[in-house]
Every structure is written in structure tokens, then in C-alpha cells.
Image (spheres, rainbow, N blue to C red):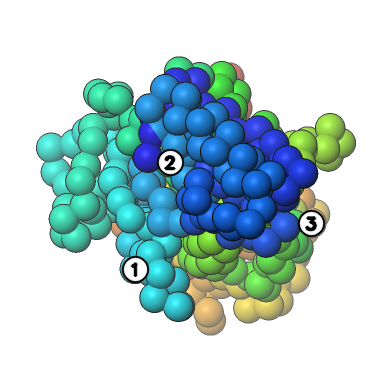
Amino acid sequence: DRKLAAPRWRRPAVDGAGLSAPGMWNARAGRAWTWTATAAPGFPRVRWAVKRLLSVSSSVDGLRIRAAPPWRILFFGTDAFARRTLQKLHGCRSLDDGKLLIEQLEVVTLPTTKSDKLPVRKYAKLNQISIHNWPCLTECNQFDVGIIVSFGALLSDALIQQFPYGILNLHPSLLPRWRGPAPIFHTLIHGDRMAGVTIMQIRPKRFDVGPILMQQECPVPPRCTSDELGVILAEKGAEMLLSVLKSLPEHIENKWEQSKDGITFAPKITVADSWVNWEEQTVEELDRLNRAIGSRVLLRTLWMGKTVKLMDLVDVEEIPDFQAATQEQLIPGTAHFHKESNILLIRCKNGWTGFKRVVLKKLLSAADFYNGYLHPYYQRSPAHQNVARFQTYTRKTRINKMSK
């Protein structure tokens, strides 16, 4: 094997004998040739071609590019989604016919004092996979290809160029839709019925803009959460990645650029995304938002200027039938405790949504919130006993005390 100075894959040159360089790759046959310069003694032209190809390969600064497995892989990742891909790569290092697919596998992840904080680091440590701390990397030119999954850092062109086949990214969306760090969340928030996975080559300075090697659709199961969809896409993506690695040069050769149409962005989810707008958001939109981010950031609203976190959103089909007695009860943000089902009902743009628990200073059931806050409010304001409302947060809203 030889080292490549500024590696960048190009179509191998094919001569009249049907042989190709570098790496002796025959694209038609889909396999690496193992002929030597003494092969086919009765065919001088073939013998001359083999000698010429070997001399070209030996002149490329050290190591010949591998044209077929087994590959030497450097994996970049951090979270549970990336860990599932790493686990698949580590468990499938050999092909069904017994030949090696992966010869060497090492990991780059973020430094941390506790290994269990980062799923990729924890898995690598438990399975004795060599770990490199980002960004303290030494030379990477002993690897054939890099693989990056949920890493969150831009890689420099100098680093990318150290890998003969570049660095592949497993991205859980149908690029160019949902470029960015949070594609699964935005898939659910926007009610997409079709998700997918894209295997692409990364480019420096910008996320998710590189050429595509493989892309497959995946229907979004009804009422699934981001965690559930993440598991589905991680499994599918890992299988796709293994398929790409089995014939990597062919996939590199047949890659295609992303469309300039249909580009959307999936920015990182923050606390700002969890504030409920009772006047603008529908029951269905709140349901999708909760399924997307609820396991990480609780939905929140304001009660008398104080932050209230909303928990255990009730399925749309299970919302009890409540007929408002006055028009004031139909104003978005209006709260009503449904005693029969022990659900706190809140009016939004097009109907009632419900929650079974809230956090206001401490964890409260719907009944506790009614007894501690709604009922005293009614007693203090008998003239407005049907108009207890949550507030929509805006930047101008004054928050008395944030609940932690």
C-alpha cells in the first residue's frame, strides 16, 4: 500500500487491454485485479500494460490506493444515532463469504471526563476500539476512508484530503431537504410523511452539500417520536453504509450532485422552540412538536408570568369532549380542569389540547395544578371564574421566575 499526497478520487484510466489504474481496478468486473507483470506471457501488449500501470502506481508518493476491501476506516461520531452506526460497522467487519470488509476501525469523538456521557466513546471503550480526541488528530493518511455521523463539527479541507476516498457522511434525511444538525426533529415538526437516509461525501466549510452516493426513502410511522424514528433511520443508514463500502469505488464513480431545488434547513433545536403559541398553533401542530422534541425539551408556557413546563400530552383521540359555556372559554390559552379524566385542558388555535402533568416550581398532576392554582384563582376572581388563561411567551413578556 502507498500513501497519497493530496488524495482525490478520479475515474481510473482504462487502456486497450481493459486494465485500469490506480489500484488495478476493473470497473466492469467490479473487482481488484491481482495480475503481475509476468501474467499472460503470450500477450505482450497485456504484459506491457501491466508493467506501465504498476510503474504509475508506484510513483504516487508511497502507497497505492486500495481498489477493494478490506478498508481502513476512521469514524467520527458522538451520540446514540452515531453509536448505532459504529456498532454495525464493528459487528460486520467480514462479508458473508468470509472476506474482510473492514481491516482497521478507529474512532474520533469529543473529549469528556466521563465516558458514559458520549455513547460513541462509551461503545468504543467497551469494545477496545482506538479513540482519538477531537480536534487533537495526528496524520490520518493510514486510512482509506473517513465516516462521519452526528459529529457536529466542520472538517477542514486539509483533513478531508488525507483520505483517498474522502469522508462519507450518513445523514438522516432526503437531501437537499433538511440540511443541518436536526433533520429528524424537523421531519416530525413539519409533518413529513416520508423520511430517508443519504450517504454523501462531505465538503469543507459547509454542512450537507456534498455529492450523493446512495439515497433511500423511509415512510414515517404514524405518531412516532423522534427517538423511534431515529432508531429506524440509524438501522437503515448503517445497512446502506455497509452496501456502499462493499463496492466503494463504483459508488464514488457514480455519485451525483444534490438538486438545487427543494432545499430546506434543519437548525438545532433550542428552548426557544418549546414555547407554545396558543393563538397560532393547532392541536395537530402541538402534537407533532411534542413528539419531536418532548423527550429532550418539554413544551412550556406562562402562568401569571411564571414558566410552566407541560408534560404527558394527551393523544388527540383521547381528548375529552368539552363544550365551552361562554365565548370567553374559546379564547386561546384558556385552561379547564376535566375532573372525570384528570386532564388539564388548554385551548389552542383550533380546539382543546390536554396534559396530565405540569412543572411549576415542582412536578404537579393536573389535579394538583387545579387545586393549587386554578381553584384559588377562581376564588380570588369570582367575576372571571371561567377565564383562567395561560400566556403565550414573547420576547417582550416579563417572566417573574423561571422554573428550572
How far across and down, in percent of the image, does residue 338 sit? 56, 72
Query: Going from the N terminus, do you reach mark 1 or mark 2 first?
Result: 1
Q: In this view, does 261 lie to the left or right of 163?
A: right
Q: In which quarter of the image is the N terminus?
A: top left
> Which residue is label 2 attached to?
144
Q: Residue at x 61, y 40 (%)?
A: 48
Check disc 1 and give the amino acid type: Gly
Q: In this view, does 362 lie to the left or right of 195?
A: left
Check disc 2 and give the amino acid type: Asp
Q: Is residue 282 left or right of residue 69?
A: right
The quarter holding residue 255 reads: top right
Determine whether 367 is above or below 350 in the image: below
Residue 285 makes an appearance in the image: no
> Which residue is label 1 attached to?
91
Answer whether labels 3 and 1 touch (C-beta < 8 Å).
no
Query: Going from the N terminus, do you reach mark 3 or mark 1 first?
Result: 1
Q: Which residue lies furthest to the front in this view?
A: 42
Answer whether labels 1 and 2 touch (C-beta < 8 Å).
no
Looking at the picture, tell me which residue is in the foreground, 155 or 43: 43
Looking at the picture, tell me which residue is in the foreground, 191 or 400: 191
Q: Residue at x 20, y 46 (%)?
A: 130
How far across and down, in percent of the image, does residue 173 sit? 65, 50
> In whole angstroms, how far apart are the C-alphas of marks 3 and 1?
50 Å
> In whole angstroms, how far apart are the C-alphas of marks 1 and 2?
19 Å
> Which residue is label 3 attached to?
350
Q: In terms of secondary structure, where does tag 1 sit?
A: helix
Picture disc at residue 11: none
How far across and down, in percent of the image, does residue 183 sit? 61, 46
Mark 1 is surrounded, within 10 Å at the Cα level, by few (under 14), some (14 to 19) or many (20 or more) other residues, namely: few
